[in-house]
Image (tube, helix red, strand yellow):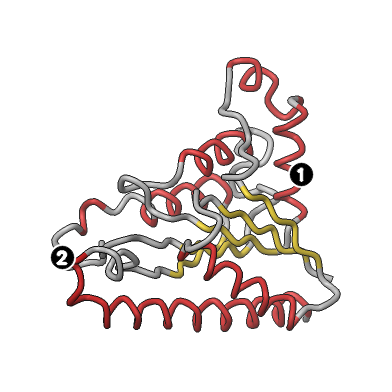
Amino acid sequence: MATLLHLDSAVLPQGSASRDVTAAFVQAWRDENPDGTVVHRDLAADPVPHLNAAAVVAGADDPLRRELAEELAAADAVLIGAPMYNFTIPSTLKAWLDQVIVVGHNTGPDSPVAGTPVTVVASRGGSYAPGTPREDFEFVQNYLEKLLTSMFSAEVDFIVPELTLAHTQPSMAELIPLAEASRAKAFDEARQKAKALATRLAA
């Protein structure tokens, strides 16, 4: 039975593109893997504290850091909802990363997380895709891909629902068809990736 660690970090409990897509992923995972386990952490509703000096010194002996590291290591797959806030990830997700990364304990090529598939739902209000005017403002995918692969040797994949503000910002009204297409694609990718992962891990 495979275990999925599911992290949400969007501030709003409803109306969040990242939460909607991660929920679709989880539902498809459960449908394919009904006997599996889903461990959910809502980092907005129940944030972990920011890293402090005592936790740094304690390392893996710190109770919270040990709990988070063990929870991550026990997961067969990880799903992260990472909306873009001010061009980067929410501070609650950064706090979780700072707590769970314990250098010398769970990092490097021999990390217990090495090879673990991590799917990141990186939603954003506009578009920061290659070739767009704000391409160089993209600090979600670039950051998480480098961090998760270099620190954990994880297998990282992204689902990117973009232009999520098109329905609420008059200046973006002409982009609504593109926003709807991006949203539909994100849901389709979430379901397909969840199903494929659940099947692969059950083999």
Three-letter amino acid code of the residue under disc 2? Ser
Image coordinates of residue 129 in percent, x first then y, are 26, 66
Q: Residue at x 47, y 38 (%)?
A: 91
Of residue 106 and residue 44, the one placed in the foreground of this image is 44
167 to 88, vertically: above or below: below
Residue corresponding to mark 2: 171
Q: Residue at x 42, y 82 (%)?
A: 185
Left or right: 167 as drawn, with respect to 195: left
Residue corresponding to mark 1: 70
Q: CA distance from mark 2 to mark 1?
A: 46 Å
Of residue 152 and residue 83, the one placed in the foreground of this image is 83
- Check the picture and name the quadrant holding the C terminus: bottom right
Q: Secondary structure at mark 2?
A: helix
Q: Residue at x 53, y 40 (%)?
A: 92
Three-letter amino acid code of the residue under disc 1? Glu
73 to 175, vertically: above or below: above
51 to 81, vertically: above or below: above
Label 1: how many Cα within 10 Å (few below 14, some 14–19, many 20+): some
Of residue 194 and residue 45, the one placed in the foreground of this image is 45
Image coordinates of residue 128 in percent, x first then y, are 25, 62
- Check the picture and name the quadrant holding the N terminus: bottom right
First in sequence: mark 2 or mark 1?
Answer: 1
Q: Secondary structure at mark 1?
A: helix
Image coordinates of residue 57 in percent, x first then y, are 65, 17
